[in-house]
Amino acid sequence: MHRYYQSGKFSDLTIKAAGREFRAHRLVICGQSEYFSRLFRANWKETVEDLIDFTKDYPRVVEALVRFMYGLDYDNCDNEELEDGSRGILPLILHVRVYAAAEKYGIPLLNKVATKKFLRTCTSVDKEDLHLIIPEVYTNTPSTDRGLRDLVTRASKAFMGSFSKMPDFVNALRQHEGFLVDILQCKLGYFQFKCPNEFCNFFWDGALENSLSSYYTCPCCRLSGPGEMWWKNSILIEYHGCDQVNAVTKASMLWRVFNLLLWCWCCEGSRAK
């Protein structure tokens, strides 16, 4: 199979991406991809012309898809096409984009391979570079796909105490709401919800669900809506006992994320994370 990919012998299909061409075989491509299988069962332009044009995909990612379906391991990129960040982070970006493409074109085995490669590479990336991966993962994967999102969250969790000294991570928290929710969930805290109904404004404590698409209902006015509508008006909280007096402080989880001081309302003492 490898030699047919290299030589293009007996090929009956051309795949184009940003000026590059890959000679392929329908049997190989359609046999491993649900997307291409459906495409060639219908009377589309691609079927008639035996040409697939990936104008919206990265050429390096398209090459990775084709190489994989011919039994070849896709290589880590150099630095021509993935211009985001330092050289050390480029293989991770490639794995994220291959993962997303495998999901898009229905190649589940490649999805698993890209996940393993991502996990192996992620463990050796400097924490200063990890923020470059967050936009890639949270832009290219849906909230229901936990594969790479959970890996990025776990990798970032180790640096939560130093977030205040890492402005790039703070920006990632602000720009990607899904990442913020995932990071906060790592601490197993609770949200103090505030009803967005201006005629209610009821507060109550509750656990944060795994997805922004989960629905919540106000115990007071019974307003119901997805999590994205609720958590923006809410504060993640923790309960802390004071070592000096018998008192309990209810504090926002942001004190832990941004390495702030926690104050006791009774003895007025403070302590850091």
Image (spheres, rainbow, N blue to C red):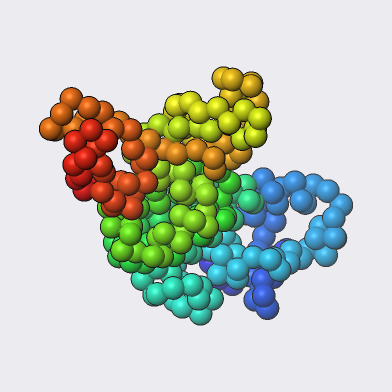
Q: Position of residue 14 (x, y in %)?
A: 71, 67
Check the picture and name the quadrant holding the N terminus.
bottom right
- Residue at the limit of the structure toward the left, as seen here: 244
Q: Position of residue 159 (x, y in %)?
A: 29, 54
95 up-or-down from 41: above or below: below
Q: Residue at x 36, y 41 (%)?
A: 253
Q: Who's the residue at 57% across and 56% down the image?
A: 139
> In the image, is 31 to the left or to the right of 259?
right
Q: Quadrant of residue 85?
A: bottom left
Can residue 56 be seen from the camera position used here? yes
For the residue pair 3 and 208, the one nearer the viewer reads as: 208
Left-right relation of 245 to 115:
left
Determine which quarter of the picture holds residue 185.
top left
Q: Foreground: 36 or 112?
A: 112
Circle count: 0
Residue 55 position within the rendered picture, expressed as x and y whole percent measured from the top left: 71, 68
- Position in image of residue 270 (x %, y %): 20, 44
Q: Is residue 10 visible?
A: no
Depth check: give the residue in front, 137 or 254. 254
The one nearer the camera, 119 or 219, is 219
Q: Residue at x 44, y 33 (%)?
A: 191
Q: Quadrant of residue 130 in the image?
A: bottom left
**Which residue appears at 12% of the width and 32% of the height?**
244
